[in-house]
Image (cartoon, rainbow, N blue to C red):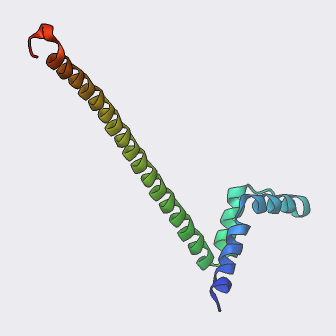
Amino acid sequence: MNRDEKTLPSLLGAIILGDDILDTMKKDLRRHHSLKLDTDELRHILKEGVLKQEIIEYLRENENRRKSEDRRQNSIKVENDRRSGDDRRVEDNRTELQKRLQELEVSAYTLTTDPSRGFV
């Protein structure tokens, strides 16, 4: 059994437990069998009595993996935003220092070239 054959039942389980399929099943049960179930009840029945436990575990693992990846991506985004903010602060400081240096250079030039100051 190759990898695709092993994951196919789990993929089918995920499709069957999807909201669109459950809604279609609910309509069919109501029309043809006079059974009125809400989505959560139907999902519970399928999980507990119809689908194999291995499929349910696979779906849980996938959901946990997805949540973990979402948290990781969010953490990376937060870190990148923090670094970006640090970069902006560094650039702002650099710009401020360059302005101050220019002011000091102008002041020094004025002091050395202005005869009225007596520093010629």
Residue that lies at the very extreme toward the right in this rendered image: 32
User: In the image, 16: left or right of 73?
Assistant: right
Rendered residue at 51%/65% (across/down): 64
Does residue 45 lie above or below 77 as drawn? below
Does residue 34 lie above or below 2 as drawn? above
Which quadrant would residue 41 be assigned to in this image?
Answer: bottom right
Residue that lies at the very extreme toward the top in this rendered image: 116
The quadrant of the image that shows the C terminus is: top left
User: In the image, 112: left or right of 22?
Assistant: left
The quadrant of the image that shows the N terminus is: bottom right
- Judge by depth and name the residue closer to the eye, 115 or 1: 115
User: In the image, 52: left or right of 99?
Assistant: right
Residue that lies at the very extreme toward the bottom in this rendered image: 1
- Judge by depth and name the residue closer to the eye, 85 or 68: 85
**Place of residue 57 in the rendered image (x, y in percent of width and height, measured from the top left):** 56, 74
**Place of residue 9 in the rendered image (x, y in percent of width and height, measured from the top left):** 68, 79
Instruction: Give the total number of marks visible in the rendering.
Output: 0
Rendered residue at 82%/60% (across/down): 24
Rendered residue at 68%/85% (across/down): 5
**Place of residue 82 in the rendered image (x, y in percent of width and height, measured from the top left):** 38, 44
Which quadrant would residue 8 be assigned to in this image?
Answer: bottom right
**Place of residue 103 in the rendered image (x, y in percent of width and height, measured from the top left):** 25, 22
